[in-house]
Amino acid sequence: MVREITDEQRRAEQKAALERIRNGLATRVRILVAPDACPVCRAFEGAYELDNVPELPLEGCSRVGGCNAVYAPVLDLFGP
């Protein structure tokens, strides 16, 4: 059974993820998109400063099933 989630639920999930990233070791945040992403989401794919990150789900997304872009931390000052 596939669970459908609303844009509001996606927004809440991604807002919480962004807050965890801001409170962690990240220096920036990256927006990742799926292979089936729409042109709007493709245009927003990439890394952003923590204070200049677009809100997810992205406004204008035309992907069937809704926007599935996600936040991921950029940890360029940490690691091996």
Image: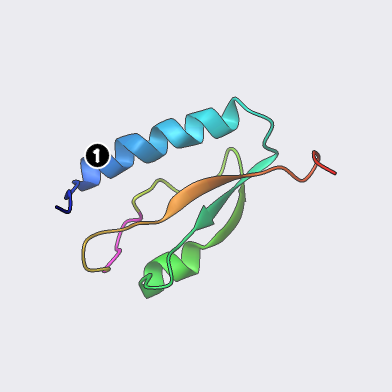
**In screen coordinates, is 61 left or right of 46?**
left
Tell me residue 33's x, y (percent).
Answer: 45, 62
Q: Is residue 53 visible?
A: no
Judge from the rendering whether residue 9 lies leftward or rightward of residue 39; answer left or right: left
In the rendered structure, the answer to whether residue 54 lies left or right of residue 1 reads right
Task: Give the farthest residue toward the front.
Answer: 1
Quadrant placement of the C terminus: top right
Label 1 belongs to which residue?
9
Residues drawn in magenta: 58-62
Figure quadrant of residue 8: top left
Name the foreground residue: 61 vs 21: 21
Above or below residue 74? Residue 23 is above
Q: Residue at x 57, y 34 (%)?
A: 21
Q: Quadrant of residue 55?
A: top left
Snapshot colouring: rainbow
- The amino acid type found where label 1 is placed reads Gln
